[in-house]
Image (tube, helix red, strand yellow):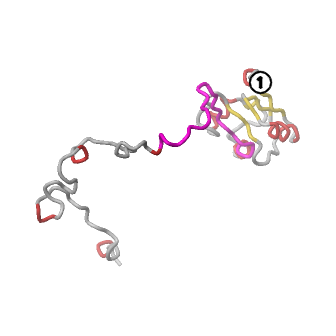
């Protein structure tokens, strides 16, 4: 078989409908939009409009609350840190700070800080200083012989 012999299966591709190209095309003149009215014109977007009836998104009750000043943390799992230490991208002997985590490429950005979570196993003895950490993550690091220090800014909240 050669490249010039390749072709799609029968019926796999379909030619697109060219709208407004004469009466013989089957979609000429008005192009399937009917006659007159708002929806026959270009540049009209009336999504969610139900002909004057109260739209569904307005009929349903509102629930919950979105805190406008909430903090967004970059979550990093312990297993991922261990993997980067083994790969030699993070220095286990030095203090691992948020800047070191970003420089190593564990996470892209720190947002309002980095939060360490306990997913994965950790065997290296690490000294980590971050904005936040779960209790299980602190226990896991201390069990491995290291220390996980949480910054005072996050602890004050």
Is 13 a magenta residue?
no
Range drawn in magenta:
57-80
Along the line of sight, the residue nearer the viewer: 76 or 35: 35
Give the number of callouts: 1
Camera-side residue: 11 or 53? 53
The structure residue drawn at horizontal position 70% and vertical position 38%, both measured from the top left corner, is: 90
Residue 105, image x, y percentages:
62, 39
Image quarter (top left, top right, bottom left or bottom right) of the N terminus: bottom left
Relative placement, left or right, of 2 versus 56 is left
Q: In this view, does 68 lie above or below 141?
A: above
Q: Which residue is drawn at 63% across and 34% down?
A: 102
97, 62: nearer the viewer: 62
Give the camera-side residue of 149 and 38: 38
Assign the C terminus to one quadrant of the image: top right
The spot of residue 128 in percent (x, y) is 77, 32
Most distant residue in the front direction: 53
Question: Dot 1 lies on which element?
Answer: helix
Q: Mark 1 points at which residue?
A: 155
Give coordinates of residue 149: x percent, y percent: 80, 28
Query: In the image, what residue occupies the spot 82% across and 40% down?
Result: 136
Which image quarter: residue 111?
A: top right
- Let me know if residue 73 is in the magenta part: yes
| Image position, residue 112 (x, y; %) | 63, 27
Q: Dot 1, crowdedness within 10 Å: few (<14), some or many (≥20)?
A: few
Q: Indicate left or right for 61 with 48 as reference.
A: right
Q: Quadrant of residue 14?
A: bottom left
Instruction: State left or right for residue 42 relative to residue 84.
Output: left
Residue 1 is left or right of residue 137, and the answer is: left
């Amino acid at each position: 078989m050669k490249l010039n012999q390749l072709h799609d299966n029968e019926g796999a591709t379909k030619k697109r409908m060219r709208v407004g190209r004469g009466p013989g095309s089957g979609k000429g003149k008005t192009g399937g939009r009917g006659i007159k009215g708002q929806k026959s014109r270009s540049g009209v977007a009336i999504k969610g409009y139900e002909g004057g009836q109260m739209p569904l998104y307005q009929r349903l009750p509102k629930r919950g609350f979105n805190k406008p000043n909430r903090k967004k943390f970059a979550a990093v799992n312990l297993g991922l840190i261990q993997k980067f230490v083994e790969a030699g991208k993070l220095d286990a002997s030095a203090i691992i700070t948020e800047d070191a985590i970003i420089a190593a490429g564990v996470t892209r950005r720190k947002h309002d800080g980095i939060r360490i979570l306990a997913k994965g196993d950790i065997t290296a003895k690490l000294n980590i200083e971050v904005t936040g950490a779960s209790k299980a993550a602190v226990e896991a690091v201390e069990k491995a012989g290291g220390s996980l220090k949480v910054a005072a800014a996050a602890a004050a909240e």
